[in-house]
Amino acid sequence: MLRRYALGFCLALGLSVPATGQDSTEPPPPVAAPRVSVMAEELPRAGAVVVFGADKPLGLETVKALAAANKQVIAVLPEGADRAPFAALKVEVASADPLVPGQLKTMFTSAPVRAVVTAFDAMGEKPAFGAHGTRNIIDATKAANLPRLVLVSATGTEDGVDLLPWYVKFLRGDEIAAAAAAEEHLKSSGLDYTIVRAGWILEKDVAGAAPALQDAPAFSWITPTGLARLVAGVVDTKATSGKTTTALDPERISLFSVIF
């Protein structure tokens, strides 16, 4: 809620001052880049896909998308979280705290698991487990000899920083820096990984064009359902193994396109 008020203040400030070429409140239009196919050959693996942050909109929609594709899923929730949204999805629900490595080890060794999905920053707010929990998830995945991890990260890491509107840099600079550290830790882990970067995830779904993955960094706003479908689509796709991709919604590349 605090972030929402801060964003509104920043928008009002941006509207009251004429923008120059150096002080633009919006990123440049995304550069055309090859799109990543999610219909490529699937990886030959058995077991469940573990989804962390399933209590958040992005995590819940990812679970739904995987279940709709007839994937075996384990949705990970904080202790005491509402399990009602998963009752009709025919997925397993587990509780584990990423800040407690022992709980991750128990969960990863209690049932066959073939892939892990986790979002560093699902809603413009740091999850309860934050950067340390993300690192623990990566380490526990490696220690359990699980082959693959899909990380939802943030646009603005590495060469994407110049694409960010000034208000995103102001509001989310610390989270983006921590997401960059999580990406580097994942890349050095030796796991088969895919990183999906997203600009800013909306709090709820609204109608619009279907987003797509591309290789070049870009900034856009994106809905939880749109991003979740992209994330679910890369879990078993060879074409995205070892790659860093960007989720782009071409109809939401500016704040004005989200508000109006």
Image (cartoon, rainbow, N blue to C red):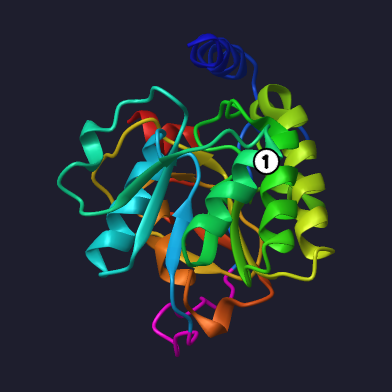
Q: Foreground residue, 16 or 236?
A: 236
Other residues around mark 1 within 10 Å, as few (<14) / some (14–19) / many (≥20): some
Q: Is residue 38 magenta?
A: yes
Point out residue 173 in the picture as x, y percentages from the top left corner. 75, 30
Q: Which residue is mark 1?
A: 102
For the question of whether residue 83 can be seen, the reply is yes
Q: Which residues are magenta?
A: 32-44
In terms of secondary structure, what is the magenta stretch mainly?
A: loop
In the current view of this chain or complex, which residue is farthest to the left? 88
Q: In which quadrant of the rendered view does residue 121 lie?
A: top right
Q: Foreground residue, 104 or 119?
A: 104
Q: Is residue 168 left or right of residue 201?
A: right
Q: Is residue 178 left or right of residue 249?
A: right
For the question of whether residue 21 can be seen, the reply is no
Point out residue 220 in the picture as x, y percentages from the top left corner. 52, 47
Q: Is residue 216 left or right of residue 238?
A: right
Q: Foreground residue, 227 or 222?
A: 227
Say which element carries label 1.
helix
Point out residue 212 in the picture as x, y percentages from the top left corner. 44, 65
In the current view of this chain or complex, which residue is farthest to the bottom? 41
Point out residue 18 in the picture as x, y percentages from the top left corner. 64, 21
Q: Foreground residue, 119 or 30?
A: 119
Q: In which quadrant of the rendered view does residue 177 lie?
A: top right
Which quadrant, please, contains the C terminus?
top left
Q: How many marks?
A: 1
The residue at the point 40 percent across, 59 percent down is 211
Q: Amino acid at mark 1?
A: Gly
Say above or below: 223 vs 91: above
Q: Is residue 157 magenta?
A: no
